[in-house]
Amino acid sequence: MEKREELYRGKAKSVYTTDDQDRLILLFRDDTSAFDGRKTSQLNRKGMVNNKFNAFIMQKLEDAGIPTQHDRVIASNESLVKRLNMVPVECVVRNISAGSICRRLGVEEGKDLNPPTFEFFLKNDELHDPMINEYHIASFGWAEPTHVEKMKELTFKVNDILKALFLQGNMLLVDYKLEFGLYKGQVILGDEFTPDGCRLWDKDTREKLDKDRFRQDLGDVVESYEMVGQRLGVSFD
Ligand code: TMP
Ligand code: ASP
């Protein structure tokens, strides 16, 4: 597999074309960013940890019947993925209140949400990822209604699979964000699933083990991501 030019540079990952038009390389950098890019830092080993973490989770999801873009790990901080046409919409499920929902709705952190909530956000840093609904997605043509239905269905299915997986490691899946794209007309899970895009708490102590450690200056960010992975059986050698 030959790596060609940089197609896109995000806040924490870069995307490269390859000699296969159906495949891209995702390079997980050591960069970390929060608050729409207003807070950034370089964290040693983060690219490697997130690449291996993501590959592990994507494999678990594939095994449980979720179609994902992941193909295979090709270097410590790089994975080969299917080339998708990304839908510019983020799907967020919350099992416990935390983060923006607390600010927006004035609810306290840590409340169990039964049933879990589902929210769409537009992927646009300049606009601070505004919350949108299905009518916006249809009116502006960001995705077909049938594809939106599929995204919701898959996002909730991921919740069942990953809540159970993290519980085995004595962790609570508080919330998470997924992004989808189209591959040969099919809705496929894209982007990544790492502690950068979800909230995970220790079940007993409720200690934060995800990117809130970076957002809130709690320290040991990569160490914590690695511990989460180890509790699930991810190998970082
Ligand atoms: P929020 O509380 O900031 O709305 O985020 C909810 C969850 O989704 C949290 O785990 C972080 C993740 N998320 C991202 O990773 N990127 C985003 O752009 C958004 C809106 C959420
Ligand atoms: N959308 C936010 C960002 O781009 C998510 C976060 O704070 O992590 O940084």
Image (spheres, helix red, strand yellow):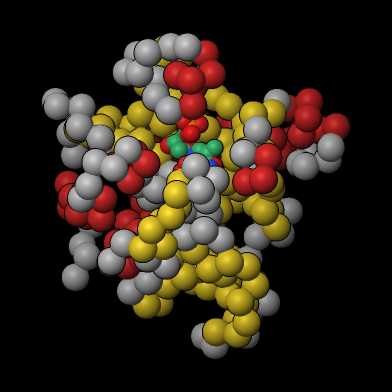
Q: Is residue 220 left or right of residue 19?
A: left
**Between residues 211 and 190, which one lies in front from this camera angle?**
211
Q: Is residue 56 left or right of residue 87?
A: left
Q: Position of residue 6 (x, y in %)?
A: 61, 77
Q: What is the quadrant of residue 197 in the picture?
A: top left
Q: Is 104 located above or below residue 201 in the figure?
A: above
Q: Quadrant of the C terminus?
A: bottom left
Residue lying at 78% horizontally and 25% vertically, measured from the top left: 135
Q: Is residue 170 left or right of residue 91?
A: left
- Residue reaching furthest to the front: 38
Res. 89 visible in picture: no
Residue lying at 67% horizontally and 77% vertically, measured from the top left: 21
Q: Position of residue 152 (x, y in %)?
A: 60, 32
* Tally of numbered tags: 0
Residue lying at 32% horizontally and 18% vertically, measured from the top left: 110
- Residue reaching furthest to the left: 204
Q: Position of residue 120 (x, y in %)?
A: 62, 31
Q: Is 106 located above or below residue 9 in the figure?
A: above
Residue lying at 20% horizontally and 50% vertically, measured from the top left: 220
**Between residues 104 and 145, which one lies in front from this camera angle?**
104
Q: Position of residue 33 (x, y in %)?
A: 45, 52
**Between residues 198 and 185, which one lies in front from this camera angle?**
198
Res. 24 visible in picture: yes
